[in-house]
Amino acid sequence: MTIHELQQEILRLKRETDTCILAHSYQAREILEVADVCGDSFTLALAAVQQPHRNMLMCGVHFMAESVKLLAPEKTVRLANPLAGCPMAEQMDKDIISAVKQSLPDYTVVAYINTTASLKTVCDVCVTSSSAVQIVQRIDNPNILFIPDKNLGAWVADQCPEKNIKLLEGGCPIHAAVTVADVQAARAANPEALLLVHPECVPSVVALADYVGSTTGIMQYAKQSAAREFIIGTEATIAEHLQYDCPDKRFFALGTKLVCPNMKLTTLPDVLLALRGEGGTVIDMDDEMIASARKCVDKMIELGG
C-alpha cells in the first residue's frame, strides 16, 4: 500500500471503530495528517476528556497513553506501538521517590508530566514545560522537590528565586546531549537564525537561546515571529513540521543529536494494525491506581488554570 492508501484506510477505520487518534508533535508528518488531535502530552490528555469517542489511540509513548487513561478512565486507550517508552519517565520509580520524601518531609513533590502513573501516585502536583514556572510560583510551600528532569528544574529555579528547589539526577537524554559546541556550529552555519530551545537542554545551552520554551511554545514563537530563520533546539521533527507550516521561513535542526528513537518507533502500519485490533497495546490500570495518580494531575489543572 502507498502512504496515501494507508492513510485512507486509517481514516475509514477510525470512523468505523469510533476511535480518536492522538498524535504527539514529535510524530512523523504522515501520522499527524490522520490524527484528530496533535500537540504536546498534556494537550493530548485533555483532548481525551473533550473528545466524544469511546476509543483513544495514542501515537506517542507509554506515559502519554497513561495520562489519557487517568483523565478518561471510562475509555479504551491503546498505545499504537507497545515498545514506545520514555527513558526520562522510566528513570525514577515510586520506591525511589518515596525514600527521598522520607528524608525531605517538608518538601512538595513536583513531577514533570513525563513520569509513569505509578510514580505520580506519590507526587503532589504535575507540571508541563509550559506550565512549570506558573505552578511552582503558585505553590504555597517554598521547598520544592522537582523531578525527574534536572535541566527543566534548573530553568524553573532560575525563574523562581524565591523557592528552594531541590533537583535529582535525571532528564531527557536526547535534549541533554546537545552541547555549546553544537550551538556554536549551528549559529556559524546559520548566522541570521534565532535559536529556540527546549528547557530540557542543559543550562549552558539554554543560556545561549533567543527563546526558551515548550515544544508548543517554540512552534508558536516561530510562527508568530517576524524573523525568517530559526534553529530549532528540540526534537528534529519539529523543524520539519514548521517548514511545512511556514514555507516562507527557514528552519534548521540544532545538530544531529535531537532525534528521539522512541518517538520514531510508531509508523502508519502500526496505526492501521492498532485500529484493526491486531497491534498496539491496551492501557490497563486499576481504579485505585487511577484515583491515586490522578490527584497530582488534577492539582496541575487547578494551579495551572
Image (cartoon, grey):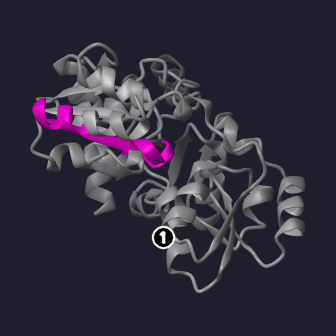
Image point 59% across, 86% down: which residue? Answer: 226
Q: Quadrant of the N terminus?
A: top left
Q: Which of 123 and 258 is in front in this view?
A: 258
Q: Estimate how packed mark 1 is, as few (under 14), some (14 to 19) or many (20 or more) residues with alpha carbons within 10 Å.
A: few
Image point 37% across, 43% down: which residue? Answer: 23
The image shows residue 198 at horizontal and vertical percentages of 62, 56
68 vs 198: above or below:
above
All told, the count of numbered labels is 1
Q: Which of 148 and 248 is in front in this view?
A: 248
Let me know if residue 271 is in the magenta part.
no
132 vs 79: above or below:
below
The image shows residue 174 at horizontal and vertical percentages of 68, 39
User: In terms of image quadrants, where is residue 270?
Assistant: top left
141 vs 229: above or below:
above
The image shows residue 294 at horizontal and vertical percentages of 26, 35
Q: Farthest residue in the bottom direction?
A: 226
User: In terms of image quadrants, where is residue 249?
Assistant: bottom right
Disc 1 secondary structure class: helix
Q: In this view, does 53 lie to the left or right of 248?
A: left
Let me know if residue 29 is in the magenta part.
yes
Residue 294 seen anywhere in this rendered image of the structure: no
Q: Is residue 134 left or right of residue 89?
A: left
- Kind of residue indicated by mark 1: Gln
Image point 50% across, 25% down: which residue? Answer: 85
The image shows residue 109 at horizontal and vertical percentages of 46, 40
State the residue position of label 1: 220
The region drawn magenta spans 11-31
Q: Is residue 191 left or right of residue 84?
A: right
User: In terms of image quadrants, where is residue 18?
Assistant: top left
Q: Nearer the viewer, residue 26 or 273?
A: 273
